[in-house]
Every structure is written in structure tokens, then in C-alpha cells.
Image (cartoon, helix red, strand yellow):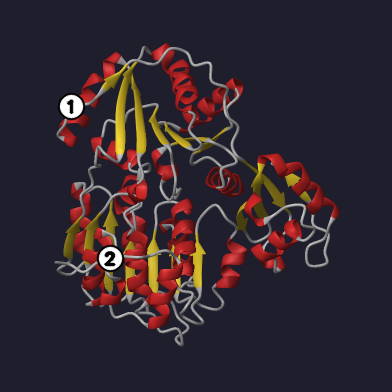
Amino acid sequence: MTSTAFSSLPLSTEFLANLDSLGYTEMTPIQARSLPAIFAGKDVKAQAKTGSGKTAAFGIGLLNRIDSGLFQTQALVLCPTRELADQVSKELRRLARPIANTKILTLCGGTPMGPQLASLEHPAQVVVGTPGRILKHCQKEKLKLDGVDTLVLDEADRMLDMGFLEDISAIIDYTPKQRQTLLFSATYPDLIEDVSQNVQQQPVEIKVESLHDDSVIQQWFFEVERDQKTPALVTLLRNYQPESCVVFCQRKQQCQELAHELKQYGFQAMALHGDLEQKERDQVLVRFANKSISVLTATDVAARGLDIKDLDLVVNYEISPDPEIYVHRIGRTGRAGKEGLALSIFQPSEIKKVQAIGAYLEKPPLFKNIPLASNNDIAKAPMVTIMLDSGRKNKLRPGDILGALTASKELNGSQIGKIDLFDFIAYVAVQREVARDALKILTEGKIKGRKIRVRKL
């Protein structure tokens, strides 16, 4: 039987203590099955659903191969979207705390080249990024990959869907032939097999069950006419009152329009799709993660990298023709053994898509009628976000913001939520009922002896 104790791996006492402090009590199935192979230096091809712990699987593996005294890029992680790259980088930094002098750099498109070029003057041991921007830095000869010991292709299926195959192949040409290649994918289209054969050597194949346990995720299907889809969604949201909910659409424009419609009804909703500027995307993700907006309309590609621990509800406003994408979507609720809820709205003409999902899951879909219009008030999100015009490049730390808010004893730490730092901006979530007081404290006071401009979002 495979051991699920992290202590069964060749990890230092400090590394194990850090894992414990981060809440990693025992290995998830993907970690237990892939980490021994990764530590043995083997290539790995793994299929696992969102929330399975795959980032920690490859993260623990690649970090323990790093020589922190060697200032060259030794590990490269390719991701399909900026959101996922940012999420992976954050997790790697948490995992790398016990390893001194480890620099982790994120390189993605949609952000200025200048600061990235400046960061590349001093090579990072670990680089995480999107294929387009990574390739551009390689072509400019600013990013050297000839010392790469570990290459990770994360969400490989989505990278291929987005047309990154040529860029990925070009990037791999810059890396040494002798390296460890780890490929992680939620689904296994034929093209994944082709890529694996081209870039991996005798990979260990790992497949973690991707279907969801009915006891963890309740799944219901609702048939409505096309012109009744939005009213049906509004009724469901009023009825179930989720604190956090992702509503999946197929197209960017529909995503934006639906978020606007939901706002008209009184919901705190925002859209996440590929046409947003980086600052807008960051703000949407921060506000959804810190519970100051409760409904996020999203496309599949944009939602990759969305890491929300307690997602109450997933709604398929449009059903994907691919059952694997359906499984991937609903896997965002019911994580870590908690109960989740997935609701799907479909038109009569889409019944074949629903039947295909049932066949894929090997159980008949469960149908319900849209409930009668609910009289429930639309619940306000529990938190409010305050934005500060200062960030980590200004030497601002989360403790500085928390200290400023609680110094006068008007507010206590339990009323302060997530604090997110970016280069020149910071966001702090506070409980809705104390938002006015928090804004007044930050507006009238100083942080580290400086006045900082703040505003409520």
C-alpha cells in the first residue's frame, strides 16, 4: 500500500515542518502516486482533476532538486493562463520557505516587459510562466534555459486547446535533452499522447479518478427555454443563496453581459474572461477569493488557475459539449471532502449533451424543475475590499496593513480578511459591517509613517 505520509519522502526536517505549518497533513492520491517517481528522477505523465493537489506534487519534487547556491534557471513551469501561473508561483513560494535563497519568478504576457527584463538580470532558480512570454524572453536571449533540470507542463490539455503547441516545442528546444519532464493534464486528448511521446522518456503514467463522488457533489439539471435561462439562473441564486458561486459560460461576450444582467438584479457579480487587462483580472480574482463578490461569471480558459477553497456552488449556464469539461468545472466545488453543489441549465435542444454527461459519469442525470420564484433577499457578500496605492515594491507587508487597522483597538484581527499584495497595489478585505470604520482608519492614519491613498471597491 502506498504511504500517504510526507515523512516517507526524502525531505528535510525543515521542509516537513513547513508542510505541516501549511496544513499539508498527508499526501493526496496524486501526490502519493507521483512524488516517489519524481524523487526517483523519472518522467511523469499524470491525469488529475482540479483541486487534487498536483501543484504541490510537482512543486515539492522540483524544489528538492534545486541547488539554491547555483544562480541559474533550474526549473521551468509552463501554464496556460496568467491566473494559473500566478497561483502556481504563490504556492511554490510557500513551499520554498525553508530553502534559503530560492528565487521564483513569474513571466506572463499582458504585463510590461521592462520589470521582467530587470528581474532576469539576476536569474531565478525557478521560472513560472505562459508559453508566449517565456518564448519571447528566450528569443531575446534574456532567459537562459540550458541549465533546466525539471520541466513541468501544467494543464497541458488547456495549453494545447489554446494553440500553444508550437511555442511549447520551441521553448523545449532551448532546454537540455537530459532533464526531467512532468506533464499534468485534467483530460487526455490524443494530442497529449503525441506531446508526451515527443518530450518525455519512458514516463510513469498516473491517473487519479476524475469522476466525482455523489456524496460530495450534488448534481442537478434544469430544462428551460432559451429566453428563460437568465430568469432561471436568478431564481436558483436567490433560492440557494451561495456565498461564492462560479457561473460558466462558453463565450467572453456572454460572460460580460451575464455579469451585467446579474448586477441589474442586485447581485454582486463580476466577469472573468480573456479580454480583461491584467489589473482588471487581478482585481476580479482578489475580490472573488476574499468574498467581497459572491458571483463570478467565467469562461473555462479564464477559470483555470482559480483556486477557491470553499466554493459553494457551480452553475453551468451553458453546457459544454465535452463531458470531461463538465467534470472539470464541477470539480471546483466539494473540495477537501466538503459537500458541493453543481446546477446545470439546458435548453430542450441540448438534451444530447446532458445524456453524454450521464454516459460519461455512468449514471443517469438527475432532473429538477426550476423552483417557484424565491422571495429571499439577495444576500450581500460578507466582505468589502479596500484598495491601497502601495505594494511589495514599496516594502509594504501584510502585517503593516493589519497593524494599521488594529492599532487603535477599534477593529480586531478577526474582522480583517485576506490581504493581497501586488507590486504597487494592495487589497485588504474587511467585514462589511466595519468597512466604513476601516476606510476611515486607513484614510486618516499612516502606514510605516507614510500616508497611502486608499479607496473602497
Query: Against 306, is 149 above or below?
Result: below
Quadrant hosting residue 270: top right
Front: mark 1 or 2? 1
Q: Amino acid at mark 1?
A: Pro
Which residue is situated farthest in the bottom direction here? 69
Q: Nearer the viewer, residue 168 or 333?
A: 333
Q: Nearer the viewer, residue 434 or 74?
A: 434
Residue at figure coordinates x 40%, y 15% from the top left: 371
The label number, if any, that marks residue 364 in the structure image: 1
Whole-number angstrom distance, CA of label 1 to CA of label 2: 36 Å
The label number, if any, that marks residue 47 in the structure image: none
Q: Amino acid at mark 2?
A: Leu
Q: Nearer the viewer, residue 334 or 48?
A: 334
Image x and y of residue 319, in percent:
32, 28
* Of the image marks 1 and 2, the number of the one nearer the N terminus: 2
Dot 2, crowdedness within 10 Å: few (<14), some or many (≥20)?
many
Asked whether the viewer can see residue 443, the reply is: yes
Dividing the image into 4 quarters, which one contains the N terminus?
bottom left
Image x and y of residue 110, in percent:
55, 52
Residue at figure coordinates x 41%, y 70% from the top left: 20
Q: Secondary structure at mark 1?
A: loop
